[in-house]
Image: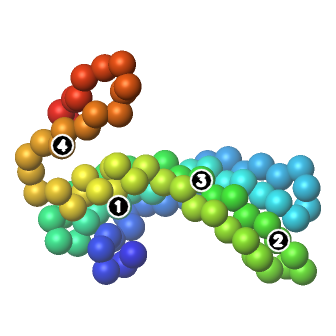
Amino acid sequence: MARHWQIEESGPGDVFGDDPGKVAVFGRTKYRSTVLGKTIISPFAVYAKVADGKIIYAQFMEDSFATARSFRPGGTWRINSDPDGRAIEV
């Protein structure tokens, strides 16, 4: 990651866990792309399973659309995801 972005800010917002072996963490990270210098803020979620004090499983989710935008020098994207609607440009 450090090759592609500088992490300017990051931190957990909320941490949940009702089972000693499972935890969910939600937060936000502010990235700046190293090539274009574009800054984005992406929410994130981490789900982890822990055994014997070690993480044995982790799943990381972020706003992939936002992070991809940090590499785009310009132009629009045409997106058609609504089966009943038309394409949009962003």
Q: Secondary structure at mark 1?
A: strand
Q: What residue is pinned by disc 3? A: 45
**73 to the left or right of 55:** left
Q: Secondary structure at mark 3?
A: strand
Type of amino acid at the residue the image marks with label 2: Val
> Which numbered disc covers residue 50?
2
Q: Is there CB contact under 8 Å for labels 2 and 1?
A: no
Callout 1: few (<14), some (14-19), or many (20+) C-alpha neighbours within 10 Å? many
Q: Is residue 25 above or below residue 90?
A: below
**72 to the left or right of 44:** left
Type of amino acid at the residue the image marks with label 3: Ala
Q: What residue is pinned by disc 4? A: 77
Q: Is residue 76 visible?
A: yes
Q: Nearer the viewer, mark 2 or mark 1?
A: 2
Q: What residue is pinned by disc 1? A: 31
Q: Nearer the viewer, residue 85 or 31?
A: 85
Q: Nearer the viewer, residue 29 or 55?
A: 55
Q: Secondary structure at mark 4?
A: loop
**Among all residues in the image, which is located at the extreme top?**
84
Residue 68 at x, y = what percent? 29, 57
Label located before the other in sequence (3 or 1): 1
